[in-house]
Image: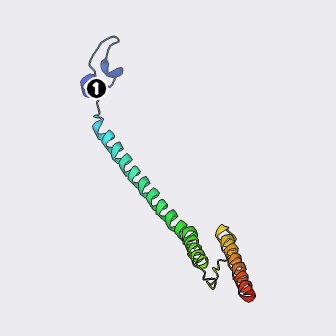
Amino acid sequence: MVALYGSQNGFGWKQGEIVGAQVVSIPLGVPLGRAYKALFWFMVALAGTFLVIIIIVDLLLRAVVVKPVVEISEMADRVSMGNVDTPEYIRESNDEIGSLSMSFNRMRRSLQNAMKMLDEQG
C-alpha cells in the first residue's frame, strides 16, 4: 500500500475519493467448533466429577448408616424370635446410630431380665 500510494497524507488519498475497500472475513466454523469441543469436554469432566462424588457419598452412607442399621435389625430379629442371649451391638458414637444401638441394647437387657423373672416364677 505504501509503495502504491506513498507514505504521505494518508497514502495519497483525496477527501471523498473511494479508492477501495478491504474486507476481512473469518469463518465462524473454526472458533465455534473449538468452543463446542471445549464445552463438550467440560461437561464430560463435570459429569465425571459428579459421578465420583455420588459414588463416594453412596459408599460412605452404606458404611456409616446402612450397615449398622442392618446389623441392629438382624439383632432385633434374633431377639424377637426368642434368642435373648444375642450379644450386644456396641457402637460408641454420639450420632443417631450410636443412640439407636444403646437403646436397643437397653431393651434387650430389659427383655432378658423380664424373661429371667418369668422363669423364676414358673
State whether residue 40 is above or below residue 18: below
65 relative position to 115: left or right? left
Residue that numbered label 1 is attached to = 23
Name the secondary structure under disc 1. loop
- The outermost residue toward the left is 4
State whether residue 6 is above or below residue 94: above
- The outermost residue toward the front is 122
Q: Nearer the viewer, residue 12 or 57?
A: 57
Q: How far across and how far down the image is residue 15, in percent?
A: 35, 12
Q: Crowding at label 1, few (<14), some or many (≥20) Cα neighbours within 10 Å? A: few
Look at label 1 and name its amino acid: Val
Q: How far across and how far down the image is residue 5, in percent?
A: 27, 22
- The outermost residue toward the bottom is 120
Q: Nearer the viewer, residue 22 or 61?
A: 61
Q: Quadrant of the N terminus?
A: top left
Question: Residue at point 63% right, 79% down?
Answer: 89
Question: Residue at point 25% right, 27% down?
Answer: 3
Q: How far across and how far down the image is residue 19, in percent?
A: 27, 17
Q: Nearer the viewer, residue 48 or 119?
A: 119
Question: Residue at point 41% right, 57% down?
Answer: 48
Q: Nearer the viewer, residue 64 or 53?
A: 64
Q: How far across and how far down the image is residue 12, in percent?
A: 31, 18
**Residue 93 visible in the current orientation:** no
